[in-house]
């Protein structure tokens, strides 16, 4: 017999889906962590985040800016300097990043221990 998801279950699925839509994927949280560590120029971010292409970094930064996590500032002059910084809204991810990092460390240790 097929069981339907309760309202609580459905609300949780929707909320998690919304969160993953905004911060999901391979790169967004890594970009936020790199920005939090003080890497705020495009090339610096690309060097720090191993494996990310310029095109993907550009797209992800635009998405993060659109969702209010990142502010982009262009300093005119020669050369033109573009800097990225986290907004106050990005602080709402602190507990998520901390928990995810702790879980990642625990999981890596578990996998190593099982080898």
Image (tube, rainbow, N blue to C red):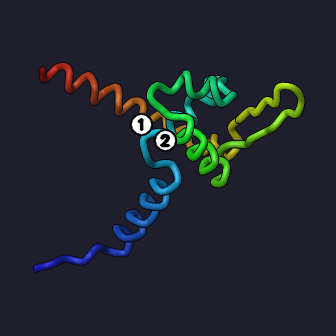
Question: Which residue is painted at 74% across and 41% down in the image?
Answer: 72
Using the image as rendered, state which of residue 9 and residue 70 is in the foreground. 70
Q: Which label number is shown at residue 41? A: none
Residue at figure coordinates x 68%, y 38% from the top left: 86
Determine whether the residue tagged by mark 2 lies in a helix, strand or loop: helix
- Residue that lies at the very extreme toward the left in this rendered image: 1
Q: In which quadrant will I find the N terminus?
A: bottom left
In this figure, what is the number of numbered marks?
2
Q: Position of residue 103 (x, y in %)?
A: 35, 33
What residue lies at 39% left-to-right and 30% top-to-bottom? 102
In the rendered image, the vertical position of residue 14 relative to residue 79, given as above or below: below
Camera-nearest residue between 5 and 115: 115
Out of 27 and 14, give the one closest to the viewer.
27
- Residue under circle 2? 96
The crowding category of the residue bearing disc 1, from other C-alpha atoms within 10 Å (few below 14, some 14 to 19, many at least 20), is: few
Circle 1 residue: 100
Which quadrant of the view contains residue 91? top right
Q: Where's residue 16, x and y in %?
A: 43, 58
Q: CA distance from mark 2 to mark 1?
A: 6 Å
Image-based side of 46 in relation to 13, left or right: right
For residue 36, above or below residue 21: above
**Residue 41 pos. (x, y %):** 69, 28
Q: State if disc 1 and disc 2 touch (CB < 8 Å).
A: yes
On screen, residue 83 above or below 93: above
Picture residue at 81% right of the left edge, 37% below the top = 74
Query: Which picture quadrant has residue 55?
Result: top right
């Amino acid at each position: 017999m097929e069981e339907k998801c309760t309202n609580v279950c459905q609300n949780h699925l929707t909320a998690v889906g919304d969160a993953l839509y905004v911060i999901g994927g391979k790169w967004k949280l890594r970009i936020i962590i790199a920005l939090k560590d003080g890497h705020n120029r495009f090339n610096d971010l690309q060097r720090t985040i191993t494996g990310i292409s310029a095109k993907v970094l550009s797209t992800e930064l635009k998405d993060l800016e659109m969702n209010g996590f990142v502010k982009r500032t262009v300093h005119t002059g020669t050369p033109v300097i573009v800097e990225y910084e986290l907004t106050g809204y990005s602080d709402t991810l602190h507990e998520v990043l901390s928990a995810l990092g702790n879980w990642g460390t625990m999981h890596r240790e578990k996998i190593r221990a099982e080898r």
